[in-house]
Amino acid sequence: MSTPLCNMPASRAALLYGGIVCLLYALVPSLFFPGPPLDVVEGFAWGRELQLGYTKHPPMQAWLLEATYQLTGGYAGGYWLSALCAGIGYVFVWQIGKRLGFSDWQAFWAVVLTSVTFYFTLPMPEFNPNILQIPVWTGMILLFHRALQKGHLLDWMLLGALAAFGFYVKYFVLLLVGTIGLYSLVFKDARHHLLTPGPWLCAITCLILLVPHGFWLLETDFLTFQYAASRSKPAMLFWDHIFNPLNFLGAQIGNHAGLLVVVLAGLGFHGLTHFLSKVEETSNERDRRHDRFLLWFGFVPLTVVLLTSALSGNEFEHMWGTPMFVLSGVLAVRYLALPAAWPHPKRALWSAGFIQFVFLTVLFGQAVLEPHWKTKQSRMHYPAKAVALELAAIWQEETGSNLAYVAGDMWSAANVTLFAPERPSMFYLHDQVLSPWIDIDDIQKKGLMIVWRGERDKPLNEILHHYPNAVRHGQRTFPYQTSGPMPDARINWIIIPPGAVSEAMPK
């Protein structure tokens, strides 16, 4: 018996399992989170402007968030976008497994094991470019495998289009594009495709779709690259060249703890001591090609990141590993001979369900229970709507017009843009370079509200540069969205009337 769901087809079991998991990861935050995470708030503030790029990232995450806002009028669409990304990823993992010769039940377990890696659990509610890369990477790997096997021009064109979509999500997709390109050069059976129109049509499709974003980069003096350079963490000591790659690797291993638990639960003690004897040997050429493909895309991206970190000493964010391990479940099934080597598949499935329950309970606890013993303020419980409505009302009372522009740090300003009536534009840090959508003539006509949090009576230094003598016009406190002991939020503001907005460029 390969699984306790064996009374139904494996495809239906995978659909049922994946569908329930995705639904729960969308419902729990939708029902219980009092406010959206930082990356989601940030994305809504950007998406409102519908630009071809933004300060930190290309535009796709922000565009999709804005689309959900236009459809629903709220912010919960971000949770469902994350669940959709995971669901599409599961479908592609299933198809990759089948293309690599898996049985239906092997493909089912590839989906289950993928779902219990950390990136598909606790980070799910924070829809950001890392999460959005999941369907991009799985889809590109699938399309590349299909293109190599069938040589259809449509597959190559779709691969190019999805690669372009990936660049509109996050430039990190260049790592996968390079992995695909290197594979095409290294292996003879892939290299012969370079003499056909397919790969060149793929490249042309990608480049054509990237032209608009390329012009935006030129117009903004490569704003996203400037931001990345300003946030990079270069090596300070020789030890960084050793510690940083090992730290990244250790984090990625830790992020697979759930997968390891499910595997061990299925093996049991007896299976753990004997499962190696059940590993199936592959001797035919087709299986060796499948193994080569799987190992290449499973480990080459990680190897490149580790080598880059070791040579440069740079520290890589752990969450950048999100799309790099979409094949972890497939690798586990293939090289641990699952589910054939499992004496206890029922235990494995129950343990997978228990892991999902634990992470969903953690999400629920963060929203509902944690504030009752946590005194530190949390973004999730920030009174964003109350603050935004109050500030909009104050602006209306003082000026007799609707609030059109708000300046400040990302969290303070972006929440106002999301929850205030008419959704004012964010003038991020009062910086025209970081906010290329700002029309200085329009902002002079409509005025500007500067917002910040905390006790200080002056705004952030970046804004104080524009208004050296500025002192807050008002301050109010707002209780956090919880009955717990979190201290109130202190909100400060300055009203810059029409015609008085500083046009000075930042130093």
Image (cartoon, rainbow, N blue to C red):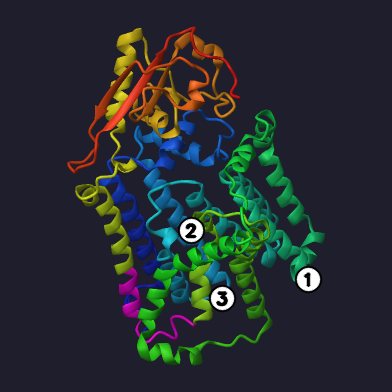
Q: Name the residue under label 2.
A: 89
Amino acid identity at mark 1: Lys
Separation of marks 3 and 1 at Cα, in angstroms: 21 Å
Q: In this view, does 99 lie to the left or right of 344?
A: right
* Residue 253 point in image, percent of width and height: 49, 68
Q: For the residue labelled by badge 2, is the local secondary structure a helix, a strand or a loop?
A: helix
Mark linked to residue 101:
3
Would residue 428 be visible to someone looking at this image?
A: no
The C terminus lies in quadrant: top right
Q: Which of marks 3 and 2 is in front?
A: 2
Q: Name the residue under label 1.
A: 188
Q: How crowded is mark 2: few (under 14 residues within 10 Å), some or many (20 or more)?
A: many
Q: Nearer the viewer, residue 197 or 487?
A: 487
Which range of residues does the magenta coloring cover?
337-353
Whether the magenta-drawn stretch holds residue 339 is answered as yes
Q: For the residue labelled by badge 3, is the local secondary structure a helix, a strand or a loop?
A: loop
